[in-house]
Image: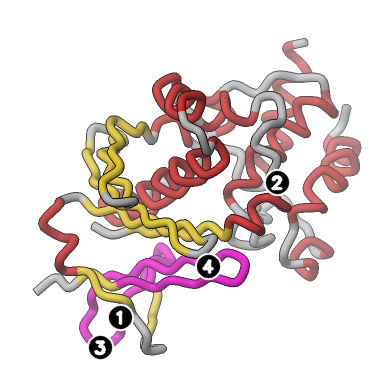
Amino acid sequence: MIGNDVVDLAIAKIESNWKRKGFLSKLFTAYEQDLIQKTSNQEEMVWVLWSLKESTYKAYQRIKYNRGFYPKKIEIQSLQIIDEKYFATISLFNETFHGQTLIDNKMIHSLVLVSNLEFKKITNYTTNSILKDKNSLPYCSISNNPLSISHHGTFKKIVQLHLN
Amino acid sequence: MNKEEIIEKLKPIVAPFVKNEVAFANLTDKTDFITDLNINSANLVDIVLDIEEAFEIEIDNESMEKMLNIENTIAIIQTKLEEK
């Protein structure tokens, strides 16, 4: 299933102070805090990890609807950088997810799916044919394919998972 | 501290993160931080930390999980104040 999340890095700098006391420990596991400590661009790592968690939360809602603020239950299990693209595995409530994150022109965009095979079934969605189900999760009104929508600051991304 | 006193102390904590002023002006128990006030989920942690400071309480992860609306937030603050 599908979840995405966009972070406008310039807006994040204004809206959030990730250095404030308690911020990292309430959101990130020990492993994730270690990733942040060990990198040269800590601010970027904070938002890469956050957008992966947010995307995983959205993807999970399609498996089992379970609203709540439980960032530390969404655990990054591994994170690799290959050609400036992040590849992650994430776990939440005994489900495993796969994430990819791109950093492009002051924007972070994460995409999370349950299977690595699904990444080739993703397209950007540009039409306005969007409806929402009973849990307010968006889908394409023509194909019924699930969509994920994210906007932050000046950036907006809508992605579609082609089921067939 | 009664419910009204908690709400009065809570409003200025939430206000800086609100993106839907109409919903904030018409605040009820059921008002949801994300779906009604359009607060960025990354700022929920700021609200939790600001509440901890203002009320001098500690909010554990289990309680934080439910802090998506006004009603739950008031209940958690009341419980934590009683435990002090």
Looking at this view, is A92 or A6 the one in front?
A6
Viewer-nearest of labels 1 and 2? 1
Q: Residue at x 34, y 51 (%)?
A: A84
Residue type for callout 3: Ile
Q: Secondary structure at mark 1?
A: strand
Residue type for callout 4: His
Q: Where residue B47 appears, x then y in whole percent?
A: 72, 40
Question: Are the residues flagged by discs 1 and 2 from a single subunit?
Answer: no
Q: Is residue B80 above or below residue A63?
A: above
Q: Verify CB contact (< 8 Å) between mark 4 and mark 3.
A: no
Q: Where residue B19 appears, x then y in whole percent?
A: 72, 64
Determine whether, in the image, residue B75 is placed left or right of residue A86: right
How many C-alpha atoms fall within 10 Å of the one at disc 1: few (<14), some, or many (≥20)? some
Residue A142 marker = 3
Q: Residue at x 79, y 67 (%)?
A: B21
- To which quarter of the image does residue A147 belong? bottom left
Question: Are the residues flagged by discs 3 and 1 from a single subunit?
Answer: yes
Determine whether, in the image, residue B64 is placed left or right of residue A78: right
Q: Earlier in the sequence, mark 1 or mark 4?
A: 1
* Residue span colored magenta: A133-159
